[in-house]
Image (cartoon, helix red, strand yellow):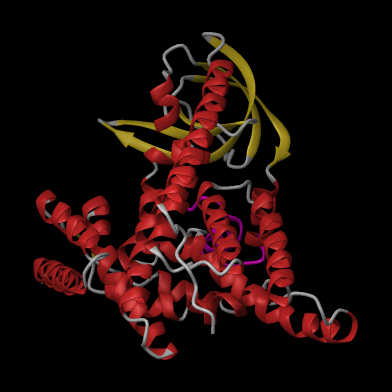
Amino acid sequence: MIARVDLFQSKKDLLYTFTLLGVFAIFSLFLEYKNFQNFTKFDNHEMDLYVLNQYVKTKEGKTYEVLKMQTMSGVSFYSISKLPLADLRGSKVRARVWTKKVTFADYFKGFYARTQLLGVYDEKLERYALSDRLKTAHQDAEVGELFGALFFATPISKELRNKLSVSGTSHLLAISGFHLGVLSFILLFILKIPYTFLQNRYAVTRHRSFDLMILIALILYSYMALLGFTPSLLRSFIMMVVGFILYDRGIKVISMQTLLISALLLLALFPRLFYSVAFYLSMSGVFYLFLFLKTFEKLSAINTFIGIHFWVYLMMLPLSLYIFQIFSFVHPLSIFFTMGFILFYLPVLLLHLTPFSSALDIWIAKLLTIDITAHSVEINSWVFYGFILISLASVFSKRWMYLLLAYALSIFIYTVYQIT
């Protein structure tokens, strides 16, 4: 087997790459600024918007509805209504928006803008309409809500979100790179046999892996278009395509160089990701996955599959605790839920293509009714920063990697002790 090469062979390659990324970043910032100028051209103006999410919030004794809006050009922001509203999730509305106080920094980070709702169109985003149809096929409303989020990335209620967070399984519902990976595996499994048959008969010289990758990428792109090119899916899709291009050219994909350039490319193309916590969590998950594969490359396939789930859970726990501060006794069981996700995802996907989509509702509903006590566990900032520094040092030395494992295990033991 021909050995794969590193992404950068010389300092000149590195210089050219960073220069190109810099050009991309400048161009992206220029486009973002032009969009910002158009959005804030007037102190207030009427525009068409989509309501992405809607929920009730109570603060200082006052109750109001929070609306997450999106412009036709894809700019998202938050607004509130002091009056009760009908369920507008996914609906297209006409509203007056006050943009005078929105700065360019706010535009990047996410912002609040005062709005006045003027009317509601008889039109919905396609994924919300499909999710509504899916929900009617389920007797239990919460189960229908769960599958709507799983297949069409529609928002879930605060109650359901809390249940999933406490059990450590919220990442299984939020469509991300993990789901793209599972879908890619399923599509490859489905398409490989018929393609091989046709190739052997009509196109023996075709590059099977390349053709299958193009076909899978087109299917996944169509799925992303249906879901509205959500940021988590878009960045995962770009990383997947970049990874295949590098692999096809004999370049190491499981490499920290590749991960770094992929992250910088995403930031250059989508600069608003700089303020996205989800982006950094996603990159961290891939970083620890690469670190495991780099360190334990000689493990068998089954040991790698099992080990990587335990490893990523332990490595991501400090980040999860630092940001969300939620833990429970069943939280570690999410390791096994993640392992078995593909065994769950494929059957329920197939069931939803038949009249028996609610066949598992009774069992899923029972799982959702299990009362799990949530505990708040905080870790010191210096403990967290120390974990990050040791993680970076682990790239260069196995000794630091073993120290990182001991550090993560200590945090896990401390967390369990805190809730006992």
Residue 302: % across, % down: 42, 90
Residue 331: % across, % down: 28, 71
Q: Is residue 325 above or below residue 110?
A: below
* Relative to 20, 337 lies left or right: left
Q: Is residue 268 magenta?
A: no
Residue 30: % across, % down: 53, 24
Q: Is residue 362 above or below residue 148?
A: below
Frontmost residue, 268 versus 186: 268
Q: Is residue 81 visible?
A: no
Residue 402: % across, % down: 18, 75
Q: Is residue 291 above or below residue 75?
A: below
Farthest residue, direction top: 43
Quadrant including the C terminus: bottom left
Span of residues in magenta: 136-156
Frontmost residue, 163 versus 149: 149
Q: Is residue 253 visible?
A: yes
What residue is drawn where x is 68% and y is 71%?
Answer: 352
Q: Main secondary structure of the magenta part?
A: helix
* Relative to 51, 337 lies left or right: left
What residue is drawn where x is 34% and y is 58%?
Answer: 284
Frontmost residue, 144 versus 340: 340
